[in-house]
Amino acid sequence: MKLPIFIADAFTAKAFRGNPAAVCLLEHKLDEDLHQKIAREMNLSETAFIKKLHPTDNFTESSCFGLRWFTPASEVPLCGHATLASAAVLFHKIKNVNSTLTFVTLSGELKARRAEDGIILDLPLYPAHPQDPREVEDLIKTAIGDTLVQDICYSPDTRKLLVRLSDTYDRSFLEGLTMNTQNLLQVENTGKVKGLILTLKGEAGGQTSQFDFYSRYFAPWVGVAEDPVTGSAHTVLSSYWSQQLGKKEMHAFQCSCRGGELVITVRADGRVDIKGGAAVVLEGTLTA
């Protein structure tokens, strides 16, 4: 078996920042168990598999492909950064001739279109509903201790818990938070929560005022301690912050060590456009 494989850093214009994803191009059907084995071997937060939908398709001229995403531990229903990485590989390395690509996924059809300064993903927008703090008290206490919390919401569609920190904190506080994510698995093992979003309102002034909100994302339940930049989390964050700020267009920053920027447009049709850059940092052949 020889598979073309790439690694692309998503939601960044510079290599070694943003969120790296592996991208495999499947010329032929791959044995089901090999998807997970390859993802475990790559050991990145996500490995994406792009497959042809018809025998006559090719990666240069076709515009619609199948797309699946795997963490080292499991398949996931949606991954924004690996979708961005997949589009970047097709556009920039394979030289796909189309301006828009459609990916058929577990979350329906997702589109990626070229932009002058990046790639725009057309993703579902998932609402987050108020969450009774008592039901998640132990989880939040384990995650952030006595840190002041302003709001707690839950997205049933994505099983993500959104915790908004007090507006009295700034970006540096969020960046400095430390967490033992393995402890989260012990206090939340019901299956209700598959990802924890910590978020903070953007500051009103100063050098970082260009960002409307900040976030960090933790998903040890699917084998990812902390994800550097997370498109799927922003399908929830975009809904939440659009309502809180009364804005449809926002600029977000995910405060992981690598960091990444997302330009967000909440659309009237209940979806969200998320724009980001991508840098392909590795290309080669997977042999087994």
Image (cartoon, rainbow, N blue to C red):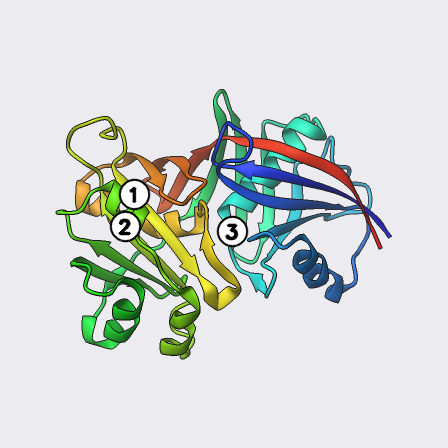
Residue furthest left in the image: 168
- The residue indicated by pointer 1 is 214
CA separation in Å, label 3 and label 2: 19 Å
Identity of the amino acid at label 3? Cys
- The residue indicated by pointer 2 is 199
Q: Is residue 117 above or below residue 220?
A: above
* Image coords of residue 19 (percent x, y): 51, 42
Residue in the picture at 50% in, 36% down: 17
Report whether 132 appears left or right of 288.
left
Report whether 142 appears left or right of 243.
right
Say which element carries label 3.
loop
- The residue indicated by pointer 3 is 79
CA separation in Å, label 1 and label 2: 6 Å
Which is in the foreground here, disc 3 or disc 2?
Answer: 2
Say which element carries label 2.
strand
CA separation in Å, label 1 and label 3: 19 Å
Evaluate if marks 1 and 2 touch, with contact meaning CB atoms under 8 Å apart: yes
* Image coords of residue 43 (percent x, y): 63, 55
